[in-house]
Image (cartoon, coloured by chain):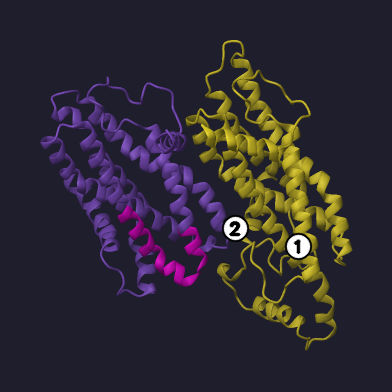
Amino acid sequence: MIGKSFQALDRILRGEGTSPEAIQSGEIQFPLAGFCVVGIALAMVYGFCMGMFSLFRDVSPSIGHRDQYLQVLAAMVKVPALFFLTLLITTPSLYVFNALVGSRLRARAMMRLLMAAMGVNLAVLASLGPIVAFFSVSTPSYDFMLLFNVAVFGISGMLGLLFLIQTLNRLSSTNTFTAPTELSPVGDDESTPQGSHSTELTEPTEHSTTPAAIDTIPGQVMGQHVKLVFRCWVLLYGLVGAQMGWVLRPFLGNPELPFTWFRGRQSNFFEAVLHTLGRLIGH
Amino acid sequence: MGRDSSLNRIEPSIAVVRRWMVRTRLDTDAVLLNRLSIETHPGRLLVLICLFAFISGAVTGSFGAFGGGNTGQIVYSAIKVPMLLLITFCLCLPSFLVVNSLLGLRSDLRIVLQALLVTQSGIAIVLAALSPCIAVWYASDGDYQHAILANVGAFAIASVVGQVVLRRCYRPMIAKNTRHQTMMRLWFFIYAAVGIQMGWVLRPFIGSPSAALHFFRQEAWSNAYIVVWRVLVRTLFG
């Protein structure tokens, strides 16, 4: 099951899982449970790489080594929690936004789409894990590592969201345009690209002709207002993700403080990042 | 006999890398792609990288030996230069491959890997080719700071050649799909960013005459970027 889920994630990364013919049914095909397990595993891999920072730091004698191991464990639990909780919180709003702009995507298809986007996000994140682990081991500065991790989460998040927007675009287009194409084989301007795709598909095509997972397919362009609505949602997702990260902190663990699972309610993510940047530059 | 056969295996690989170092402008993209996919043997190139980086490292570490000091640094550096090239390469590879897949370049993955290996080999060959010059420098000038300068110069030249080879290897791929251009720049950026920190962590390569012999510096590991930033701030603002 796990192997199949990894293959499914790989197909999604390569763009085969979200190619026009693969999403004819209106949703992305992958085993949901196995995909969750793969997602958790990838997030845990990144959590471990992140946790290396606490393992390799000199801590004051009052803190002790047990806290360092606990911090690694905490990071391995919290990274998956961060992603799944953010997903849980933002799904209803995306569903509503999507309905507002008139897409006929069903709740199940929406859930699968979000899972796939999270899979892409986690795959990029985990693949950056070795670099993060290396910097975690060799960098004593807590501030530097904090910002480094924020940057890595930012990069992978952006790629994940780019995939989400493009796939949403494809799924919406498939739903909207399939019916008219069937009704009128000649097709109007909008259905022509769809038609040309299906003729391409009957010919033996190479892998390279599959559009990339984050490509815009010609002729499938979202309207201006739809674009605006989704951009707003992406912003919301980013904000919720960042604040969720803040609620679940500490991930890295300040070497000067004893281990805690959570910290008190104070400040916010953006203020903290700015403060950290100021401290790092001001040295 | 053994030496002959291993030399026979290495020599064609050197010839392959050399052909990427000389001008490729006259060759068509198809010829270049064919050359990358058929002539390049990843295993042999890896052996070549290890061998030439080993030679370069041994010479870099011989600074103390020229002054009649410790010779242990020769062995340490001979191990560390291949480590620098290969560990950096391995750390950068996963994210590079995932982003390549995401940009729809999975079908070219094998050829991309071969291009990267040719580039790494180019760097190792240039480093090894410059090592006799480094040795002459060590023999004629006993100043540690000058030795550092000579090695920085050699690494800078090797990096420039690496960049040139990378561009030549990527040219036919970019002609096929312009997204490869983004990936080529991304590789250069990730590799340089990780390589700088790796070089910093693996110090000393030359071995200060006043310091005792150690594989790593005895002080705690630090971050190259923070160190450079602090030096810059101190220099500019006092």
Q: Main secondary structure of the magenta part?
A: helix
Q: Residue B1 versus residue B91: which sits nearer the camera? A: B91
Image quadrant for the C terminus of chain B? top left
Q: Quadrant of residue A202?
A: bottom right
Single out the residue that lies furthest toward the bottom: A186
Q: Secondary structure at mark 1?
A: helix
Magenta stretch encompasses residue A208: no
Q: Mark 2 — residue?
A: B102
Residue at image position (36%, 69%) is B32
Image quadrant where one finds the N terminus of chain B: top left
Q: Are marks 2 and 1 on the same chain?
A: no
Question: Tags 2 and 1 in contact by the CB under 8 Å rule?
Answer: no
Give the chain letter for purple: B
Q: Residue at x 49, y 55 (%)?
A: B186
Q: Which residue is mark 1?
A: A168
Is A151 placed above or below A256 here? Answer: below
Does the magenta segment cover residue B174? yes
Give the image location of residue B156, x and y in percent: 30, 48
Q: Chain of mark 1?
A: A
- Quarter assignment of residue B167: bottom left
Which chain comes out yellow in the rendered image?
A: A
Instruction: Mark yes or no: residue A107 visible.
Output: no
In the rendered structure, which amino acid carries the disc numbered 1? Leu
Does A50 appear above or below A92?
Answer: above
Q: Position of residue A192 (x, y in %)?
A: 73, 83
Q: Which residues are magenta?
A: B160-184
Estimate how packed mark 2 is, as few (under 14), some (14 to 19) or many (20 or more) residues with alpha carbons within 10 Å.
many
